[in-house]
Image (cartoon, helix red, strand yellow):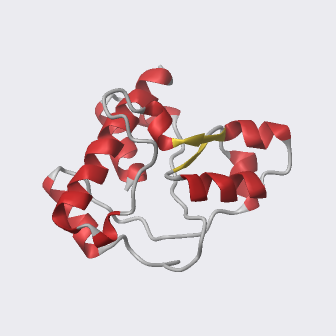
Amino acid sequence: MAEGVFRKMVAEAGRDKEFAIDSAGTSGYHQGELPDARMRSHASRRGYHLTHLSRRVQQEDLEQFDLVIGMDDHNVERLYGMARTPEQQAKIKRMTDYCRHHGAKEIPDPYYGGDSGFEYVIDLLEDACEGLLEQLT
């Protein structure tokens, strides 16, 4: 979901050629699948079209990308566990570090919280992605 939000914001800012944006998870449970249908529905109402198929984070991601962002403590810990160098560890950030208006420490898993959980996650991601884009200016 964060990839879709950030990709749209970057495009709207006319900066899509400046960034290589991708999304991956720290587990392979849903590898090759689209995001949850409920999340796609909520995201679509806000103009985000989630078509990215799930994949697992690879070691190459820590080499290739300048930033590797985890959604929660568990993800960040797993990413740190994959990092082979201090330079790779320095690339790992938490998405909520970029929030400007919300005080959340993590992006929660919305899958058990009903509609309001999905909306809250999108609110957090919009806030964080705006902050991220602002910081990368």
Q: Position of residue 19 (x, y in %)?
A: 52, 37
Q: Residue at x 36, y 26 (%)?
A: 100
Q: How many marks?
A: 0
Q: Quadrant of residue 88?
A: top right
Relative depth, front residue between 102 and 59? 102
**What residue is drawn where x is 40% and y is 50%?**
2
> Relative to 112, is 6 on the left or the right?
right
Image vertical order of residue 13 relative to residue 35, above or below = above
Rendered residue at 30%/72% (across/down): 112
Image height of 118 relative to 106, above or below: below
Residue 39: where, in percent of width, then height?
Answer: 27, 65
Lateral position of residue 21 relative to residue 9, left or right: right
* Residue at 60 percent of width and 40 percent of height: 93
Q: Quadrant of residue 92?
A: top right
Which residue is more in the foreground, 132 or 52? 132
Q: Position of residue 1 (x, y in %)?
A: 37, 56
Outermost top residue: 137
Q: Residue furthest left?
A: 45
Residue 16 vertical placement versus 64 (above, below): above
Nearer to us in this view, 3 or 127: 127
Residue 8 shows in the view:
no
In the image, is 41 to the left or to the right of 30?
A: left
Residue 50 visible within the image: yes
Residue placed most toward the observer, 95 or 1: 95
Give the x, y percent position of residue 84.
85, 51
